[in-house]
Amino acid sequence: MVAILDEIGQVKGSTSPFIEAITTSQGAHEAPLLIAISTSAPSDADLWSMWIDDAKKSEDPHTVVHEYKADEECDIMDEEQWLKANPAMGIFRSKKDLEQQLGQASRLPALEASARNLLLNQRVAQESLFLAPAVWKANSGDIDIDVFRNNPVSIGLDLSARNDLTAAVAAAMDPEGIVHLLPWVFCPANGIDERSRRDRAPYNVWVKEHKMIALGGSSMDYEHVAEYLRDALGDLDITPTSIEFDRWRIDVFKKAADDVAFAPWAEWNNVGQGFKDFAPRVENFESLLLEGRIRHGNHPLLNMAAANAIAVSDPSGSRKIDKSKATQRIDPLIAAVMAVFAVSEGETTQTFDINALIG
């Protein structure tokens, strides 16, 4: 059996029911062959990127990868880079067409991201990503749980909808000024396979790997969430000093927290999600990342959120993260940004060009 998939890079997220049907059906044949052809996906968290990265990392002898792409941050008008990404240039790929499209993108910045993705085969989102993948990866070191036991701990809380994800991310700063992140991400137990397909994310796999917590029935029970956090923190001997929260449905969660004695001694702080309140937190988080002062432990839910978060600006240049523009759930990152600010406000030491963070 031979299956040929074209433009798989257009699949948003890490799963696709159609492609799963094709690949799993090949198991009925003795020597199946799958050929996939595509320009680059925009994000590390998209299916095509994950296939390529896994093949390179595993060095599986049954998988052959031929990747043609321009160098990161290359000059968009460098013809040598055009050839690296388009080896058929001048044969059946028109050089004149490339010159026209890339020339237009060089004159119109709004077109550059799309041109780099579709013409130079670079992993560049066609919207303004909050974080560059390389910057996020550079902060993926392992966390030290003792940092949470010996230093002030803030928990960012993003409840989201009752039938979606609820994220709690603990942050603590070690004596060297490194902020460590410890996330818990919850979803309702019923319908997890359907939710995985809807959000194009392997929630069912992450639950089995204990990276995600499935609780209750078809909707999120905040009392169960509060109980889980209370017990998990107790088992780890961690006492939170503050809870940073988005006000959405916090009245329901706070009652549940009081009922089960979750974080009774912590200070509860309301964090507005508009430009005024969130812009300083965004800038603080970005600066720490560029200084290499965050450890997120390569947690898959944080990775997914970081790979899909979109930043938007108001007329004054203040920036926030816009959930409505993200292609996947970004609740864990919102929770992390809130928690990190509480333990590190004023601790960043340098001023950076924020454009360096944009993927």
Image (cartoon, rainbow, N blue to C red):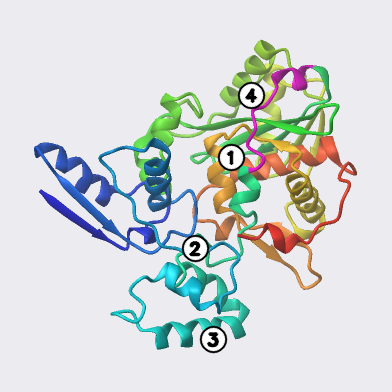
Residue at 65% over, 43% down: 138
Circles 1 and 2 in contact, beta carbons < 8 Å: no
At mark 1, the secondary structure is helix
> Mark 2 — residue?
122
Q: CA distance from mark 1 to mark 3?
A: 36 Å
Q: Is residue 175 above or below residue 292?
A: above
Q: Residue at x 49, y 66 (%)?
A: 70
Where does residue 273 sit, x and y in percent of width and height?
A: 73, 52
Q: Which residue is mark 4?
A: 226
Quadrant placement of the C terminus: bottom right
Q: Which of marks 2 and 3 precedes in the sequence?
A: 3
Camera-side residue of 57 and 258: 57
| Image quadrant in which you'd find residue 57 | top left
Residues under numbered marks 3 and 4 in contact, where contact means CB atoms less than 8 Å apart: no
Q: Is residue 260 above or below residue 249?
A: above
**Foreground residue, 308 or 322?**
308
Which is in the foreground here, disc 1 or disc 4? 1
Q: Residues within 10 Å of mark 2 (few under 14, many from 20)?
A: many
* Structural crowding at the residue carrying mark 4, measured as other residues with C-alpha within 10 Å and reported as few (<14), some (14–19) or many (≥20): many
Position in image of residue 101 (x %, y %): 47, 84
Q: Is residue 246 visible?
A: no
Residue type, numbered disc 4: Ala
Disc 3 residue crowd, few under 14, some 14–19, many 20+, Cα 10 Å: some
Q: Position of residue 325 (x, y in %)?
A: 56, 61
Q: Amino acid at mark 2?
A: Gln
Q: Which residue is mark 3?
A: 104
**Residue under circle 1?**
302
Q: Nearer the viewer, mark 4 or mark 2?
A: 2
